[in-house]
Image: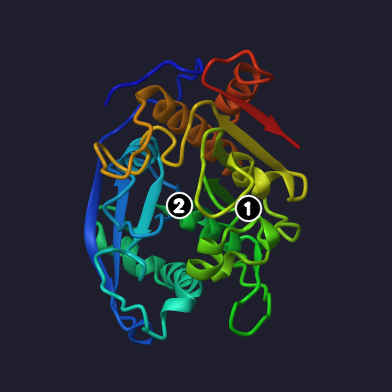
Amino acid sequence: MTTYKTTGLTGPPSTPAVSVKPVVLPAPQRGEDLHIRVSAPVTGSNLPIVLFAHGFGSHLDGYAPLVDHWASHGFVVIQATHLDSKRFTVAADDPRKPHMWRYRVQDMKRILDELDTLEASVPGLAGRMDHGRIVAAGHSFGGQTAGILVGLRVRDPKTGVAEDMSDSRVMASIQLATAGKGGDELTAFAVENAPWLRDQDFSQITAPGLVVAGDQDELPLSTRGPSWTTDPYTLSRSGKSLLTVYGGRHSLGGISGYEAAETTDEDPGRVALVQQVTLAYLRHVTGTDHTDWETAQAALAGDSHPLGRLESK
């Protein structure tokens, strides 16, 4: 794996990792079994867990640049294929369609309920996962999913109720290129196709979090431009950090996959920046090590670094 020295971070040495897929959990209430991929380093104990939610249309095989990096540096990464994946064919009039955002959260909670089963599915992993250190992460639509698990309130477009769907088993979140607030800033396209974005409240998120946003991320969902994706940071309480990726569009240089068709701004340097800063944050927030996070904060402070800026509140 190529390492780009973008931030001066050295990080822990990488180790071989293994992935097992699909681990299938019956899920009759969603109409499709829940297919899961588990990636883990082959050595180490008390391994923290990253629960990762893919973007709209993706699947459990996506985001290898992040998943491989995290798994080879000491984390168990668990991914599911959500109902909005292109691997399923959910018709436009399917009654599940307006509830895709809710099914995603239910998928993640089902995974949390079945951690013992998932641990046993990977040869040599039994007894090595730390169930007390779980971070939810996600890209795009998956960023909302991760946010809900730590307290993001989403007003249900059908019921009008914004309930607390957080899960106390999740200690922190990483939200990558994800949606901001709703209201009159949403485009007509967003209102029609993603009604679950109409009213989001970030003020109830009390858990620590890292938000990653590209300053060229022009989405068809908001009239406000790239700053919309910084809302999960700017509209949240303290204890959050924001990594702004200079020149980054929605794929942040290509985190969605190696040579992925949806990558709009392929750039190995940007991907390396996101890899290194997210890993440093994961190690920091799980209490594994704080050195690399402190190094990243110093290296990316202000506007001096050519690839990005890291700020905290």
| Residue 67 falls in image quadrant | top left
User: Label 2 amino acid?
Assistant: Ile
User: Label 1 amino acid?
Assistant: Gly
Q: Quadrant of the C terminus?
A: top right
Q: Quadrant of the N terminus?
A: top left
Q: Rate crowding at label 1 as few (under 14), some (14 to 19) or many (20 or more) other CA atoms within 10 Å.
A: many
Q: Position of residue 304 (x, y in %)?
A: 63, 13
| Residue 119 falls in image quadrant | bottom left
Toward the viewer: 191 or 68? Answer: 191
- In the picture, measured across the screen, residue 255 lies left or right of residue 124, that is right
| Residue 169 falls in image quadrant | bottom right
Q: Position of residue 89 (x, y in %)?
A: 26, 73
Earlier in the chain: of badge 2 and badge 1, it is 2
Q: CA distance from mark 2 to mark 1?
A: 26 Å
Say which residue appears at 31% left-offset and 76% top-offset.
Answer: 90
Image height check: is 313 above or below 219?
A: above
Toward the viewer: 110 or 54? Answer: 54
Examine the rendering and report whether any part of residue 241 can be seen: yes
Image height check: is 142 above or below 115?
A: above
Q: Rate crowding at label 2 as few (under 14), some (14 to 19) or many (20 or more) other CA atoms within 10 Å.
A: many
Examine the rendering and report whether any part of residue 12 can be seen: no
Which residue does the numbered mark 1 point to in the structure image?
Answer: 180
Which residue does the numbered mark 2 point to in the structure image?
Answer: 49
Say which residue appears at 40% left-offset and 32% top-offset.
Answer: 253
Instruction: Tell me the element at label 1.
Output: loop
Say which residue appears at 60% left-offset and 77% top-offset.
Answer: 157
- In the picture, measured across the screen, residue 35 lies left or right of residue 109, that is left
